[in-house]
Image: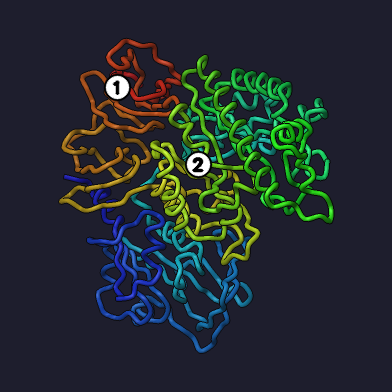
Amino acid sequence: MPSAASLGLLAQIFFQVTAPDAGAWPDILSSAGFHRGEPAAITVLREGASGGGWRDRARDGGILVLEGVSDVAAEFGFTPGAKRVRIQSIKESHSPKLHVVWESAVEAPVFRVPAEARVFTRERWEGAPLVAGMRYGKGAVLWVATSPGARASERYPYLLHALRDLGVEPPFRSRRLWAFFDSSYRLRADPDYLARRWRSAGIAGLHVAGWHYFDADPGRDEFLRRLIAACHRNAILVYAWLELPHVGESFWERHPEWREKTAIGQDAHLDWRKLMNLANPECFRETVRGVGGLVNRFDWDGVNLAELYFESLEGVSNPARFTPMNGDVRREFQSAHGFDPIELFEPGKPADAAKLRVFLDWRAALARRLQIAWIQELETLREGRPGLDVVVTHIDDRFDTGMRDALGADAAALLPQMDRHDFTFLIEDPATVWHLGAERYTEIAKRYEPLTRHAARLAIDLNIVERYQDVYPTRQQTGTELFQLVRAASLAFSRVALYFENSILPADVPLLAASAAAVTGVARIGDGLAVRSRQDVWVAWSGPVAIDGRPWPAMGDGGVLVPAGDHVLAPAAEQTAVRLLDFTGELKSARAVPGGLELAYRSSAKAIAVLNMAITSLEIDEEPASAEVIESGNGRTVLLLPRGQHLIRLRVKINAP
């Protein structure tokens, strides 16, 4: 029989909205992985709700969400007073310094709330309570003064956070996220603390700013080695993030002769990037040599070739930021087309449209040529490092088609290289569309999938930063808006990356992994659960478990690791002795065998496996192999498994501590 804790976890998967018009509530709750269905532990009662038995429902473990004025809200002590308040700016206890401004003001009564209730949100200037909640018996009650609005993220960013504070945990979590990391301001941070925090947020791959380590430096290098080791111990892969044609500060200082030029003849120091002329053969060779040293100096799991094209988002309209205009490029173009492209930027003279079209197309072809050359260089490096993964981060130019002329970025021209080279194509969300809704990721996926036979290797990069557009209710994506973005992206793409790990507000970290879980269907089956997911997912569970009728060994603190596809979880009589506590690869199957464990998986990089026992032997694809153990002791063994698709059989020390 399942434990009471297991049944409680199963019940919290489902919610219902009692009103015919559910409003934004389904979108809010589903952004953290809750599903509409029965039997529902979470019940939303909208404005004007009535009826009896709700106290008993909460006392027995139900979670009630009460909206505005209703008989049910009054029964729990949330009653309107005579005074009214105009609401447009609010203060959230989960992020008190955050500016939260509604696009349209709303007038509402000032409510009295029970003394035992915790107020999560107040009107900023008069302090009127807007969101409050309390535990009630075995359950909880969350009250909201007004409707959350027509859109899920319109008014209250942190409703899900309040539910979590009241004991409601999301049922599903993903541990497949990637994140970008710039260590320039974090050299004093404890790598073990950072790695534990990242893994709890669902991060499986960290892309570390490699330009800081282009030249050897004892202090910096030691920090990076400790960071990589800490990440590996915590089941996080680490990638060298390159931002060519930015090579590094010292490279820029040493080689002024190779600096890129803008259309007004200045050195191309644009924002934080200092761009080099990689079209110059000598500069290219020296950069290749330096990147090879960087890759081979550290225990990287992969390399991310990011944003290798030209500036700027404003395109030809801003000559001061337009590149490439170095002498090598100008001479090559003039030799092929009979005119110097600098003529297109003569002050006071409109550019010849036909000539401009020729140059912009040639520029995009040059970017593609450089990208292919660097992909080939990384594959050469991989010959000596067979576990090395390769990622190409590329600005989207299919959804925002202006990016091709602005940056020389042409995804359609580059994607056929996936037929010849093994890499993940990470599509970057351009700044021009950061204000649009989560549904854009579905549309972006539709535009890219027909361009390649390798859609499973398409990924999406979300920039979690302050936006320049007028956006409401927050300048930066946080709370429900962030979770909607991550969930939509996870359902549309096989991998989601976040820029950057430190821009995610602390309040969002505990719920981030839940929003990334790509579960598309769930149903109760007796004491068990049927789950359909696009990628593997961790399911909250307590006690021994069987999947598809077989005792299941992939289970750790995060719950049960369930492979992609359709599977049925059910209580098992006993837990397998050997357990897979954590894993970074795409798990296809797992089963306990006498004295050990058998795993089938696929991984574009090496895979990190965490076991509850020390291992004595390893077979890879039915051949004996040496185990690459990262750490072993205290009832925990961390080992690296090879890149690719493999069948692994592990033998363990059954009596290991």
- Seen in the image, is 57 located left or right of residue 410? left
Res. 222 visible in picture: yes
Q: Does residue 164 lie above or below 152 as drawn?
A: above
Residue at (81% x, 25% y) in the render? 254
Image quarter for residue 35? bottom left
Dot 1 surroundings within 10 Å: few (below 14), some, or many (20 or more)? some
Residue at (58% x, 29% y) in the render? 240
The picture places residue 263, in percent across and down from the top left corner, at 78, 44
Image quarter for residue 291? top right
The picture places residue 456, in percent across and down from the top left corner, at 39, 38
The picture places residue 499, in percent across and down from the top left corner, at 57, 45
The secondary structure type at the circle numbered 1 is strand
Residue bearing the label numbered 1: 647
Residue bearing the label numbered 2: 412
Q: Quadrant of the N terminus?
A: top left
Q: What's the residue type where badge 1 is placed?
A: Leu
Q: Mark 2 to mark 1: distance in Å?
A: 35 Å
